[in-house]
């Protein structure tokens, strides 16, 4: 017999390891073999499964229960390691069928009674050869008999042939035992295991029983097993004799047959009579059934009509209830007052009106009722009520906003007065407006277009109040701030270096600007948020982060954590939906609400600039801090206001820098300036003061100013020095040295000034080099001329003849040296 994978000990050990790895305890691999190909649940998909290994395992029971037998299907993983794929219990095996369509006879199907689903095909396997097939099937049948005490149905294979094959093929393997020193010794061939022959005996016993039955039949006729033809002839003769006996018996029973026929005729006549009676009864019953069906049909119609009438009455009652307009609501909608005491009734009337209109619309109302005359008329009446109420409410709210703001404007106690700064307080205004917040929400649901005029009226009225408050606050803020009257002149060339304006303290100016922002920026954000919600804009809430506005005022606007952003009612940051259709409309309304208030902020900035232009630096830092904290899209105007303020401060500071540059350039007009220029030490004082004022992210602004000022200073210095070539290098040396001395400390901490410090150092070294070179040339000019003449003659005559030329003798050389070194400590000596 050919070598089979069933004899592969390595395969059996791999199967045992895979079974153990799957968590199955106590299972022993009794048999394992490779399969050529298989087809299981993927048969309907037309897909062939990958190579598989079939293993028969036995689980020994430790509690006296019967042992269990399993058929395991193992597959190869990506690492060529066996792992369990499927598990079949042999107790459910009912049929073993060898496929007749396969000419090789190696394909068989295992039928399990627990595979009830029609979509799951029974497992089908194809072995590599007939011997592998027989070994697997014989092992399965043997385990079923020994462990489960039954045999499944076998189809497509002769069990006698299988039993004979089992006798002829006894599985043997050659085992080799490795000794401790690694040498292998041959061991006598021994059987792999004792295969129980119970199945063989059963199959052979069935064949023997059939042979014994045949021999007993032949013994009856005293024939042997080889006399088949005589036995067949004998059986034919007995069959003819039996048929002749049957015919004779029929002929003898003719009188009895006559009596039976007469009885049948009488019964036939009786049956005909009964058939006639049944036809008559059937006709009468058919008429009765028709009458009963007619009566039932009329009764059903009447019953259906009664049910329909009852349902119609109920639907009409419901419809009439929808169409009824309560008198109290009609009175409130058409002529009721809008006083605070009546607002609850007005809101109830609005809610009823909204619900009534919606109840007459599809899908709340059945489409079959939409075109009814009563419904159309009632909808028209409700629309008329809605139009009347919206017009009355809109007119009242417009007048109410105007009167409320006019009252506050007429009362001077709401605004800042001489000697007293008044923080704007809109708590009472918002409280009164909130009374009508629900009314506005219902107006939006009734007619969204009415909100446009209402928003414009509210914006116009509140804009007057905000501008008045900002103007009064800014005026009193400027009046109450003590500041020097004479502005500082920093880089004017005519004055002395001590007049630099640094003696005056102008911190009150930036404090006043900070107070203006601290008071009004949160106020404007609060007003924007209140306006967005009061006027029913579908945007997130706008609130300052951290403490309320009242607490923020104590910080003086210098709190680095002061932030403005979108937040929910619990204080958590929100990200506004920038694509909201309401945002564009809201920003346009906020522009109208807050427009004009920026002029008072500009006035404070201009006033601070006139007092001390350097305060633009601190104001720029304050504005930048507020601007970086402003994240809310819904307060877009507030951010735009801060942007404009920052731009205006930058423009004013640039204007100051331009004027300072013009002051520096005026030094060019002064003829023959010597010594250190006035703007050099003044710039050091100016830079120190500017560094003191830096706040937040103002470094870029200051660095640009440094770049422009120092570039102008160096350019002007170069022009002044060029006006007198004799003293140009001395002027440059003195001024560059003064620039380095005055800015040494600042250059160590300010990168921009450090760059110009190194530039001044390089220019200083170049000027020193040029000046020393000019001094040397002036002192030794005759000596250089003498040397040049000697060099020129070396090209035309011999070196020994040069001392004999006119003016080039040793005496002439001594005379030149003496005149060049006159007044010097060096005493030259010329060898004869």
Image: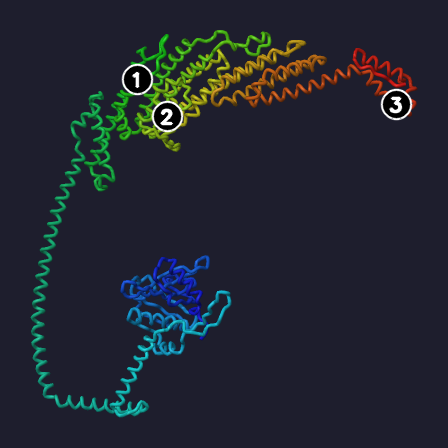
How busy is the neighbourhood of tag 2: few (under 14 within 10 Å), some, or many (20 plus)? some
Q: Residue at coordinates 40% horizontally, 11% vertically from top-left?
A: 475
Residue 791: x and y, percent? 85, 23
Return the residue nearer the eye: 821 or 257: 821
Residue 219: x and y, percent? 26, 90
The image's mark for residue 616 is: none
The image's mark for residue 793 is: 3
Would you say residue 818 is visible in this rendering?
Answer: yes
Would you say residue 104 is visible in this rendering?
Answer: no
The image's mark for residue 402 is: 1
From the viewer's perspective, is residue 593 above or below residue 20? above
Q: Residue at coordinates 10% horizontally, 55% vertically from top-left?
A: 296
> Quick check: marks 3 and 2 in contact, CB under 8 Å?
no
Query: Whole-Å distance between the Cαs marked 1 and 2?
Result: 32 Å
User: What kind of element bears circle 3?
Assistant: helix
Query: Whole-Å distance between the Cαs marked 1 and 3?
Result: 107 Å
């Amino acid at each position: 017999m050919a070598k089979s994978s069933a004899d592969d000990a390595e395969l059996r050990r791999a199967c045992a390891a895979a079974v153990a790895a799957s968590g199955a305890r106590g299972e022993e691999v009794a048999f394992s073999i490779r399969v050529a190909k298989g087809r299981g649940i993927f048969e309907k998909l037309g897909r062939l499964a990958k190579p598989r290994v079939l293993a028969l395992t036995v689980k020994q029971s430790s509690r006296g229960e019967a042992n269990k037998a399993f058929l395991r299907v193992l597959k190869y993983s990506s690492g060529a390691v066996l792992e369990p794929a499927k598990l079949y219990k042999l107790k459910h095996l009912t049929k073993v069928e060898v496929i007749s369509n396969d000419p090789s006879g190696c394909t068989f199907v295992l039928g399990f009674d627990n595979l009830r689903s029609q979509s799951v095909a029974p497992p089908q396997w194809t072995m590599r050869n007939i011997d592998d097939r027989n070994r697997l099937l014989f092992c399965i049948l043997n385990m079923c008999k020994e462990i489960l005490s039954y045999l499944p149905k076998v189809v497509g294979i002769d069990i006698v042939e299988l039993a004979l094959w089992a006798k002829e093929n006894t599985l043997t393997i050659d085992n080799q035992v490795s000794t401790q020193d690694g040498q292998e010794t041959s061991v006598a061939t021994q059987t792999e295991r004792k295969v129980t022959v119970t199945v063989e005996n059963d199959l052979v016993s069935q064949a023997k029983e059939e042979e014994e039955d045949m021999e007993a039949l032949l013994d009856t006729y005293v024939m042997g097993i080889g006399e088949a033809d005589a036995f067949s002839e004998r059986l034919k003769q007995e069959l003819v004799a039996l048929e002749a006996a049957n015919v004779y018996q029929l002929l003898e029973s003719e009188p009895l047959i006559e009596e039976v026929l007469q009885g049948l005729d009488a019964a036939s006549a009786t049956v005909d009579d009964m058939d006639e009676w049944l036809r008559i009864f059937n006709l009468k019953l058919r008429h009765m059934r028709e009458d009963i069906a007619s009566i039932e049909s009329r009764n059903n119609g009447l019953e259906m009509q009664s049910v329909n009438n009852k349902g119609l009455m109920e639907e009409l009652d419901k419809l009439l209830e929808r169409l009824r307009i309560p008198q109290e609501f009609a009175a409130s909608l058409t002529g009721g007052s809008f006083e605070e005491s009546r607002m609850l009734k007005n809101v109830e009337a609005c809610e009823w009106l909204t619900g009534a209109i919606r109840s007459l619309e599809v899908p709340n109302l059945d489409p079959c009722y939409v075109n009814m005359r009563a419904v159309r008329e009632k909808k028209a009446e409700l629309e008329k009520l809605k139009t009347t109420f919206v017009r009355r409410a809109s007119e009242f709210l417009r007048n109410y906003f105007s009167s409320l703001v006019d009252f506050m404007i007429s009362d001077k106690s709401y605004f800042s007065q001489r000697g007293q700064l008044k923080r704007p307080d809109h708590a009472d205004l918002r409280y009164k407006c909130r009374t009508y917040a629900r009314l506005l929400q219902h107006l939006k649901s009734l007619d969204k277009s009415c909100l446009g005029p209402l928003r414009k009226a509210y914006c116009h009225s509140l804009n007057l109040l905000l501008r008045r408050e900002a103007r009064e606050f800014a005026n009193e803020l400027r009046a109450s701030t003590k500041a020097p009257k004479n502005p500082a002149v920093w880089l004017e060339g005519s004055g002395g270096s001590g007049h630099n304006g640094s003696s005056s303290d102008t911190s009150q100016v930036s404090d006043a600007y900070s107070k203006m922002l601290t008071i009004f920026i949160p106020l404007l954000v609060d007003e924007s948020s209140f306006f967005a919600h009061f006027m029913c804009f579908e945007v997130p809430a706008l609130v300052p982060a951290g403490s309320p506005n009242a607490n923020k005022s104590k910080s003086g606007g210098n709190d680095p954590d002061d932030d403005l952003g979108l937040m929910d009612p619990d204080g958590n940051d929100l990200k506004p939906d920038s694509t909201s259709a309401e945002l564009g409309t809201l920003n346009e309304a906020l522009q109208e609400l807050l427009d004009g208030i920026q002029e008072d902020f500009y006035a404070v900035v201009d006033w601070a600039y006139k007092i001390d232009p350097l305060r633009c630096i601190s104001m720029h830092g304050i504005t930048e801090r507020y601007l970086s904290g402003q994240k809310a899209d819904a307060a877009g105007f507030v951010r735009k206001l801060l942007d404009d303020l920052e731009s205006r401060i930058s423009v004013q500071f640039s204007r100051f820098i331009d004027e300072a540059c013009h002051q520096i350039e005026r030094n060019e007009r002064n003829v023959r300036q010597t010594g250190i220029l006035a703007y050099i030490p003044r710039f050091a004082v100016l830079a120190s003061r500017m560094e003191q004022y830096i706040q937040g992210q103002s470094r870029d602004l200051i660095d640009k100013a440094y770049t422009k000022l120092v570039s102008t200073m160096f350019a002007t210095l170069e022009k002044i020095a060029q006006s007198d070539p004799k003293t140009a290098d001395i002027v440059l040396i003195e001024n560059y040295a003064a620039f380095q001395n005055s800015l040494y400390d600042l250059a160590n901490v300010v990168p921009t000034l450090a760059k110009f410090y190194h530039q001044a150092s390089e220019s200083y070294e170049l000027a020193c080099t040029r000046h020393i070179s000019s001094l040397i040339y002036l002192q030794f000019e005759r000596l250089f001329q003498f040397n040049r003449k000697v060099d020129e003659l070396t090209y035309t005559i011999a070196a020994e003849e040069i001392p004999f030329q006119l003016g080039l003798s040793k005496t002439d050389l001594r005379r030149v040296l003496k005149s060049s070194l006159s007044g010097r400590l060096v005493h030259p000596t010329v060898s004869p």
